[in-house]
Image (cartoon, rainbow, N blue to C red):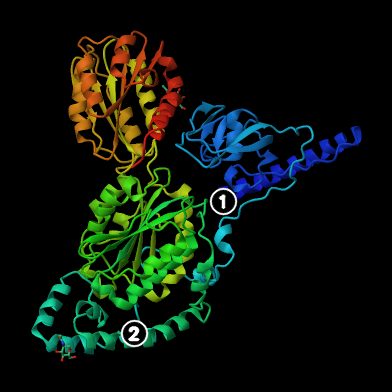
Amino acid sequence: MGIAVLAMKASVIEMFLVLLLIGNSEAKEVTKKSKKPKLSVPQINCDVKAGKIINPEFIAKCPAGCQDPKYHVYGTDIYASYSSVCGAAVHSGVVDNSGGKILVRKVAGQSGYKGSYSNGIRSLSLPRWRESFIISEGKQKRGMTYPSTLEYSSPKSSTAKADETTKSYQKSTILLSTTPQPTTTTRRPATTPAEPLSTTPRLWTSLDTTTASTTTITAKLQPAGHRVRDTGFRSTAAYAGNHSITQTHTAGETGSWKPGLALLDAGSRPNEELKTRSLEPASKGDPNCKVDLSFLIDGSWSIGKRRFRIQKQFLKDISQALDIGPAGPLLGIVQFGDDPSMEFNLKTHANSRDLKAAIEKIPQKGGLSNVGRALSFVTKNFFSNANGNRGGAPNVAIVMVDGWPTDKVEEASRLARESGINIFFITIEGAVENEKQNVIEPNFVDKAVCRRNGFYSLNVLSWFSLHKIVQPLVKRVCDTNRLACSKTCLNSADIGFVIDGSSSVGTGNFRTLLQFVANLSKEFEISDTDTRIGAVQYTYEQRLEFGFDKYSTKQDILNAIKRVNYWSGGTSTGAAINYALEHLFKKSKPNKRKLMILITDGRSYDDVRIPAMAAHQNGVITYSIGIAWAAQDELEVIATHPTKDHSFFVDEFDDLYKSVPKIIQNICTEFNSQPRN
Ligand SMILES: *[C@@H]1O[C@H](CO)[C@@H](O)[C@H](O)[C@H]1NC(C)=O
Ligand SMILES: *[C@@H]1O[C@H](CO)[C@@H](O)[C@H](O)[C@H]1NC(C)=O
């Protein structure tokens, strides 16, 4: 925090100085040629993306310090509008890291952007984007006038107009606790006027005694570990056959529903408003929030009919606030009970209006709260191309659970994260002290979410305050830069280094070689669900230095690389490849990209062709790095096609460092050129 504030101060001062200087130089210019009108150049920050600025052509001034990897740039020469304007300016060489004036011109979207390393910035590849821009020197073109202030698209311009609902939510947002686990144990005070029936187990009891069949079903509905709520609502759907009882319930619910809501919202949300808005034409969607969303909603009996309806209202509010559309977020819904079922996929309803109407019609399916099973379903089936997954948009799964899940979520969540799904967890009315013993998997939220930093979990104390998290949730989900579990070239591979430890290398060079391995490893995001690193050293023989599952932090990996002992001996590269396939890559996970990086300084004693072919056939993308006496023909045989992108050669060990950026860039380019998920 402190540093950020200091940095901000520094940049404010810098800007001030820059402005002063501009002022001075411009004053001089004006006196020199007094006819030229004074041009005031708008200033933009490093993190401003071109897509945020509406003007089709403008001159702007970039501050110093935009040559930073955190300002993502996509493309080369022609950049996707998703890029930082000033980052692209540095990448293109129009300005350097000290900033300066640039001319930006918007051009049509491209079907592909190629990343490259240039002027100290590594730009990324992107399959396609709806708009691009090009950068040139910040000089006025003859006869052109440029805007003196820039027009920004506001983050929610398309929904801001009429969304009264949103406003009323914002007011109450601050009150909300977003800590993963509440310390308070007061879940639902029995006295709350919103729930007059919740304290009357009367109906439930009377049902139990009515018929024999009723009792049997009751037992099935309440297995150990499932939330038992003291309300009769859940029975309505289960005993829909008994008409008279159903009606009693419905009457009771409607009676209590309205005063409950009115009390909570203090009259700030007239329900009718949601309906009048549906006359707007279908939106293309909010382009600042292009995500593919899967909502996993709780349809279990424990939740009851009324809360199920609150859940649907919440989904409708979310759909409205998100501004669903083909150029923005898309949303599909999976309802879980005993088993999950797809209510609709990403393509079914591509605007907020249709989606809201469809949500209204979702019937509660009943059963348990098998969240783990639902997450597996989402990983396997939901995010497929056939279901409208767009590849370029981050995948997000939002799990809504009443109380706690009735099955385990850890393993299913891990697989989901490895597939690049950002899991958010919303727990509503979590277990109170005396219910904790029933929770099947303690800390299930931590085990499920994308990162345990609080960003991916929201805890809501009561279903009746669920509406308060509409805005916080939308904000988080749309903050695509923070969706850390999305698959990228840096977080989704199992990388196996195959290191030549033969006598010709020598002790000193072997250290350089390990440095090289460490420098490459450093570039990746390392954890057990992100990129994993393994290493094999070989001479005539081979040994596993460490496998993929041995270490799960970057520091541990770097330490382990340092500890590798130089072996010294012959050079059997072919056998080493076979060994790596058997001892490293066989243990790779199915949803990881397998990368082998083989480093050698000489010709192999054995044949490399058959082992290399086996690697390629097993889907192991192979990079070969040759030093000094390494044989070019062998490097090419080992490398994956096209070999010019996968084989590297340097004359000396001391030049190895030069190929690090190029190798990373090629790994990313290859990743980005392939379909996701
Ligand atoms: C429905 O419930 C009533 C009591 O409320 C009972 O008399 C009747 O037999 C029940 N009908 C069925 C079909 O279970
Ligand atoms: C590794 O990185 C360090 C620090 O950036 C650099 O000094 C060194 O030359 C690099 N070595 C290799 C072999 O990449």
Judge the density around disc 1: few (<14), some (14-19), many (≥20) Cα neighbours within 10 Å: few
In the rendered image, residue 538, in percent from the top left (x then y), is placed at 23, 19
In this rendered view, identify the residue nearer to me: 645 or 491: 645
- Residue 303 as seen in the image, left or right of residue 101: left
Q: Note whether residue 539 is visible.
A: no
Ligand 2 - quadrant of the structure image: top left
Please report whichever mark, 1 or 2, sits nearer to the chain's N-terminal start. 1
Mark drawn on residue 2: 1
In this orientation, does residue 279 appear? yes
In front: label 1 or label 2:
2
Q: Which residue is mark 2?
A: 253
Splitting the image into 4 quarters, where does residue 607 fall?
top left
Q: From this view, report whether residue 395 is shown above or below residue 543.
A: below
Q: Amino acid at mark 2?
A: Glu
Which residue shows up at 24% across the image and 60% down it? 340
Residue at coordinates 37% horizontally, 34% vertically from top-left? 674
